[in-house]
Amino acid sequence: MRPRIAVLVACTVFPGAGSPANAGDPAQGERVFQYCYSCHSVMPGETNLQGPNLAGIIGRPIAAQNDFAYSPAMRDLAARERVWSESLLDRFTAQPEAVAPMTSMQFHGVDDPAERADLIAYLRAIPRP
């Protein structure tokens, strides 16, 4: 009986406890974003970089930034997947080439699942423009 009470208290006091959708530390994710920083921005409206802006990416249609010329690989991914879910972002940031074959993005991926969870938590915290 006591373990159930402990779980109930943990879920009440820490609403994200045990929920994969709420996993990750946004503060740590901001550090992980340094892998992405040279090509991507999360500042709403900033579009002068090599990659598309990532502000509000979770739940956003793939390859949908109007002023960005996406590669055929990203347009193909958009046709298959439609929207950036947290699960898709996790797979993509782990192995970009496996998720979007022939992508022009020159990044090997983030191997550590905890770092990816932190990165996704950081991106989740960035509001949509």
Image: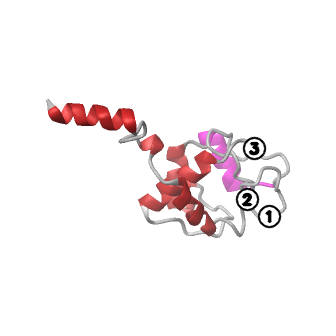
**Which residue is found at the position 81% from the left and 53% from the top?**
68
Q: Which mark is residue 64?
A: 3
Residue plotted at (71% across, 49% down): 55
- Please name whichever residue, 128 or 62, is drawn nearer the observer in this view of the structure: 128
Q: Name which of mark 1 and mark 3 comes first in the sequence.
A: 1
Q: Tell me the mark number nearer the camera, choosing from 1 and 3.
A: 1
How far is mark 2 from mark 1, CA to CA? 7 Å
Location of the C terminus by quadrant is: top right
Residue 62, x across and y down, in percent: 68, 44
Nearer to us in this view, 31 or 55: 31
Residue wearing tag 1: 49
Stretch of the chain drawn in magenta: 69-83
For the residues labelled 1 and 3, the Cα–Cα distance comes to 16 Å
- Indicate the amino acid at tag 2: Ser
Which mark lies nearer to you, 2 or 1?
2
The kind of secondary structure element at disc 2 is loop
The earlier-in-sequence mark between 3 and 2 is 2
Q: Is residue 71 magenta?
A: yes
Instruction: State the SS at label 3.
Output: loop
- Residue 56 in percent (x, y) is at 68, 44
Asked if residue 110 is among those painted magenta in the image, a careful observer would answer: no
Q: Quadrant of residue 8?
A: top left
Name the element at disc 1: loop
Specify whether 15 is left or right of 7. Answer: right
Residue labelled with disc 2:
41
Task: Please report the residue visible at 67 percent of the width from the left and 55 percent of the height from the top.
Answer: 73
- Residue lying farthest to the left in this orientation: 1
Image vertical order of residue 124 relative to residue 41, above or below? above
| Circles 2, 1 touching at the beta carbon (< 8 Å) | yes
Give the quadrant of residue 105: bottom right
Q: Which quarter of the figure is the N terminus placed in?
A: top left
